Image (spheres, grey):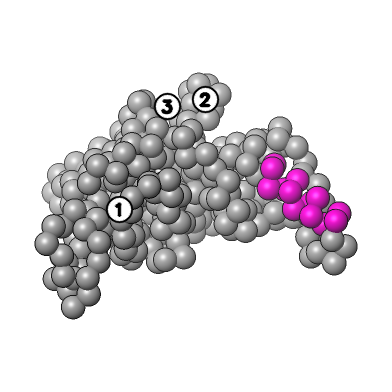
């Protein structure tokens, strides 16, 4: 039977995942008694994983935190904070990628790699110099705007899940997961695809109705069309970062690989700029 420290942080994915590496950044300045980070796979199996983990591990005090992406499980409040969801703590932004989609960070990465190319002629960097922060900001926003209707429908599906009390039978997308975009992003096509999910879900959950779903769509269309939603860049909180990443790469395929950028950005981002991550750090320290 294995013996580990008395503090454990469970997160999604594998040891190579952004989630695991973000938590490493969060705890890097903790001076003593750092926790063990345990990647736990899918969010849908967290409770089973935690129970099975402690049944195999010799520990007298089960001091642990389960931390994962918020996804579409809770609406983010105006105040930036770590969100409580049952026994779990969730990111304020939709997922880890949302924290990294920052025009300054992308620009700095681009310039850094370009300078390295100038000093090393055999470098394989082929993207030239950065187009500038304004162009990168436009790249991010245009990708978000292309996703507006799709995100409306995903949030409307999330409302049905919340109202039904079931989290297993209805997903917030028909594509297989975040980062896999549908062939059409128009409101009508997304709505029709989602209605097929709703009709299937209705057979099991009688409280789910098409009228409720369409009312949610109308509410999110209004919310996501407000000028301040875009001027305040609220899409970086509400829209799913994996979807935004995919849309960005589709729109500007000649631009940098965001996967490679994320690897760099995780080590460069300032944790102190994000109150929810600071709160996570404090909760871990006080376990």
Mark 3 and mark 2: Cα distance apart in space: 16 Å
Please indicate, yes or no, whether residue 270 appears anywhere in the rendered image: yes
First in sequence, mark 2 or 1: give its number: 1
Neighbor class of circle 2 (other Cα within 10 Å; few <14, some 14-19, many 20+) is few
Question: 110 or 34: nearer the eye?
Answer: 34
- The percent position of residue 207, horizontal first and vertical second, equals 15, 44
Residue 126 sits in which quadrant?
A: bottom right
Q: Which residues are magenta?
A: 107-119
Which residue is the site of mark 2? 232
Give the numbered dot on residue 33: 1
Q: Nearer the viewer, mark 2 or mark 1?
A: 1
- The percent position of residue 68, horizontal first and vertical second, equals 33, 51
Q: Nearer the viewer, mark 3 or mark 2?
A: 2
Quarter of the image where the N terminus is located: bottom left
First in sequence, mark 3 or 2: give its number: 3
Which residue is the site of mark 3? 222
Neighbor class of circle 3 (other Cα within 10 Å; few <14, some 14-19, many 20+) is few
Mark 2 and mark 1: Cα distance apart in space: 39 Å
Residue in the image at 18% along x and 46% along y:
86
Mark 3 and mark 1: Cα distance apart in space: 48 Å
* In this view, 276 is above or below 114: above
Residue 52 colored magenta? no
Q: Is residue 206 left or right of residue 263?
A: left
Question: 256 or 206: nearer the eye?
Answer: 256
First in sequence, mark 3 or 1: give its number: 1
SS of the residue at dot 2? Answer: loop
């Amino acid at each position: 039977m294995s013996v580990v420290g008395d503090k454990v942080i469970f997160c999604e994915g594998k040891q190579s995942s952004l989630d695991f590496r973000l938590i490493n950044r969060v705890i890097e300045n903790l001076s003593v008694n750092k926790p063990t980070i345990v990647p736990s796979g899918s969010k849908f199996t967290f409770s089973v994983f935690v129970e099975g983990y402690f049944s195999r591990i010799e520990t007298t005090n089960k001091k642990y935190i389960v931390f994962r992406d918020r996804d579409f499980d809770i609406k983010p409040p105006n105040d930036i904070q770590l969100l409580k969801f049952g026994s779990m703590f969730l990111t304020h932004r939709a997922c880890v990628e949302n924290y990294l989609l920052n025009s300054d960070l992308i620009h700095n990465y681009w310039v850094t790699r370009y300078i390295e190319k100038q000093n090393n002629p055999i470098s394989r960097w082929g993207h030239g110099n950065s187009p500038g922060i304004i162009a990168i900001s436009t790249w991010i926003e245009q990708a978000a705007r292309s996703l507006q209707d799709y995100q409306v429908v995903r949030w409307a599906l999330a409302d049905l899940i919340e109202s039904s009390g079931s989290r297993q039978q209805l997903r917030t997308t028909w594509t297989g997961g975040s980062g896999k975009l549908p062939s059409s992003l128009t409101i009508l096509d997304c709505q029709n695809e989602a209605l097929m999910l709703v009709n299937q879900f209705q057979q099991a959950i009688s409280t789910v109705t098409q009228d409720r779903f369409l009312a949610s769509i109308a509410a999110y269309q209004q919310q996501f069309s407000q000028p301040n939603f875009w001027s305040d860049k609220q899409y970086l909180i509400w829209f799913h970062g994996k979807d935004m990443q995919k849309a960005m790469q589709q729109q500007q395929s000649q631009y940098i690989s965001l996967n490679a950028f994320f690897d760099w950005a995780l080590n460069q981002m300032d944790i102190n700029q994000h109150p929810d991550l600071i709160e996570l750090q404090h909760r871990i320290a006080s376990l």
